[in-house]
Image: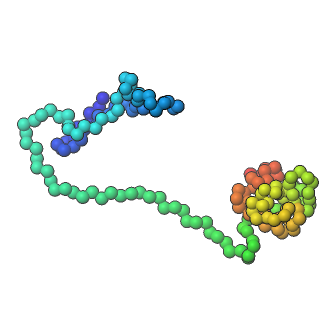
Amino acid sequence: MRRRKAKAAAAVTVLMATPVVTAKIGSDTSDPPLWAHGAPVRPKVLLEPLLPPTTEPLPPAGPAVPVALTTTTTVPPPPPTVTTLPAGKTPGPSDSAWDRLAQCESGGVWHINTGNGYYGGLQFSLESWRAVGGTGYPHQHSRETQIEMAKRLYAQGGWRHWPGCSRKFGWL
């Protein structure tokens, strides 16, 4: 056990002890705490110093000194720059990147429906298509509409929505 002695009479002495675990994972809360079974005691804070009594008078206490408390905060980063685009346009990869992806996903056939549960040139699932505001089925819409919906989906997770071809191109 270590003692830390304060120099002033009003100081607090802290006894340091080994930390105590007071509960086991999955233990019943009606069990007594571990320290009741002989585990190391909890650290104690004593309000009286452990100094031997002395006959020397203590110096008079000085005036109270106000202490300023400061808080350290981290300034959040500025919001990303938003580029203003024409109405209905979403930022994202260029149309030529989408054409390359469509070539890989569907052989570049924008109106394809093979019955595999994925539709259009970029092989949207119906769930993904509708999640970004698409109506009907993807293969029933133009290349431009499919690219617009793909950009919205891309904004929600990047190329991971097209894992096979994205890995093939080194985009993931």
Residue 43 at what x, y percent from top left? 33, 34
Residue at 91%, 62% in the rendered image: 111
Residue at 81%, 49% in the rendered image: 164
Vertical position of residue 155 compared to residue 41: above or below:
below
Query: Nearest the camera: 62 or 168?
Result: 62
Is residue 18 at all visible to an observer of this figure?
yes
Q: Residue furthest bottom?
A: 86
Residue at 46%, 32% in the rendered image: 29
Q: Residue 68: which quarter of the image?
A: bottom left
Q: Residue 149: which quarter of the image?
A: bottom right
Of the 4 image quadrants, the one containing the N terminus is top left
Q: Is residue 2 left or right of residue 20?
A: left
Is residue 169 at all visible to an observer of this figure?
no
Residue 52 at what x, y percent from top left? 15, 32
Q: Residue furthest top?
A: 38
Vertical position of residue 136 compared to residue 115: above or below:
below
Residue 109 at what x, y percent from top left? 92, 60
Residue at 37%, 30% in the rendered image: 18
Q: Is residue 160 left or right of residue 114?
A: left
Vertical position of residue 52 compared to residue 140: above or below:
above
Q: How is the image coloured?
A: rainbow
Q: Residue furthest front?
A: 30
Q: How many marks?
A: 0
Query: Nearest the camera: 165 or 10?
Result: 10
